[in-house]
Image: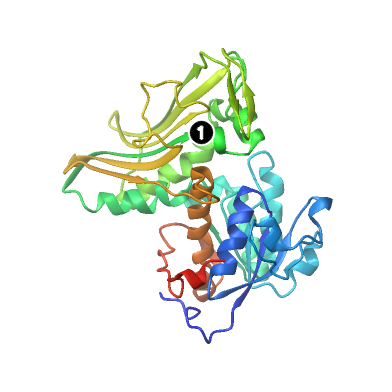
Amino acid sequence: MSSTYSGADAHPLQTVVWGTGNVGRAAIRAVQAHPALALSGVVVHSEAKIGVDAGELAGLPTTLGVPATGDLDAALAGADAVVYAASGDLRPDDALADVLRAVRAGAVVVTPSLFALYDPPSAPADVRDAVDEAIATGGGALFVSGVDPGWANDILPLLASGLASSISQLRCQEIFDYTTYDQPDAVRILTGMGQPMDYEPPMLVAGVPTMVWGGQLRLLGRALGIEFDDIVERHDRRALTDTVDTPLMGRFDAGTQGAVRFELEGHVAGDAVVVVEHVTRIDAACAPDWPQVPDGGAGVHRVIVEGRPRIEIDVVATDEGGNRAAGGNATAVGRLVNAIPWLRDAGPGLYDALDVPIQPGVGKLGKATLP
């Protein structure tokens, strides 16, 4: 299907951005730049942000004439679409309730925040039932794709797989230095950076990696016609040898966790045939034997097809003054925001990465389009 909203004479879809953190900032910019969308509202939870212009919240040099609000009913009234950018890491039930509220209001909703719905067929029945009920009630639509970013764990590896004659393993890697990732809860608490080595990061508790990334692994398997015999979690952690001071995240003491590596393996007949791997550091010198960013920078998303031919694809994205963590967020947001017109045409339903085609950047070429 192709969108009917790509033309300049089409009525812009009134789009709300819900949340103004790392993802929300990028979402405001993406909506503002999209020729088929109009930013109609920004929802915030902080009293200090209420009334602040969306342009200021997004780090833009101009105001957009859209003040942030905490009034959900007012923001959702008349909204065609919602980009739900509030985190679901530590509040999954609240995030689901928020998203269902927007779907019941009849909006197209796109979000990276609901891990369980990366692969809807394998989502818990109670989550699927709640989404189906909201869609039936309000006539909205929902598309969930990862923020780490989703395209690197679904459409890019699947594209690469179609270039090979034979494949023994398909691997998706995220390799990042978290020094520039200004999200203390995720860095220090969830992944354990700067914590004593006897601290157990919640992200590495048995079953959690499968809960978060298992949907992406299963979606890949489904697309490739594979049913995994087992999904295996592996992880390793390394301590800092020296104390590190970072400009955004503060001090990380020697002897505390400075790097973590984990992977989720989809096994068939005892072989890991599909792997989603994360290698994360707070200092580039920690765990030097682990996979590295080839140019010595802060991050890369990599797809490796072990087969004939062997294929390796590195993607480096930067935003907000060259920040690669921000660049990864922005590409994840771009995938979601650019899908909105297609979803509006497709009609009510729950969609995944195999349903939603990549949308070309119609109307976005040229410096004049930059917000």
Dividing the picture into quadrants, the one containing residue 93 is: top right
Of residue 136 and residue 367, the one placed in the foreground of this image is: 367
Q: Is residue 208 left or right of residue 103?
A: left
In the rendered image, the vertical position of residue 244 relative to residue 67, given as above or below: above
The amino acid type found where label 1 is placed reads Pro
Provide residue 90's location: percent of width, then percent of height. Answer: 67, 38
Q: Is residue 273 left or right of residue 256?
A: left
In the rendered image, the vertical position of residue 136 relative to residue 115, given as above or below: below
Q: Quadrant of the N terminus?
A: bottom left
Dividing the picture into quadrants, the one containing residue 68 is: bottom right
Q: Can residue 146 be spotted in the picture?
A: no
Q: Quadrant of the C terminus?
A: bottom right
Of residue 212 and residue 129, the one placed in the foreground of this image is: 212
Of residue 170 and residue 185, the one placed in the foreground of this image is: 185
Provide residue 216's location: percent of width, then percent of height. Answer: 44, 45
Q: Residue furthest right?
A: 47
Q: Secondary structure at mark 1?
A: helix
Disc 1: which residue: 209
Residue at 55% from the left image edge and 33% from the top image edge? 179
Residue at 78% from the left image edge and 62% from the top image edge? 72
Provide residue 194's location: percent of width, then percent of height. Answer: 61, 22
For disc 1, the neighbor class at 10 Å (few under 14, some 14 to 19, many from 20) is many
Provide residue 114's location: percent of width, then percent of height. Answer: 59, 48
In the rendered image, the vertical position of residue 139 relative to residue 297, given as above or below: below
Coloration of the structure image: rainbow
Q: Residue furthest bottom?
A: 9
Q: Can residue 295 be spotted in the picture?
A: yes
Number of callouts: 1
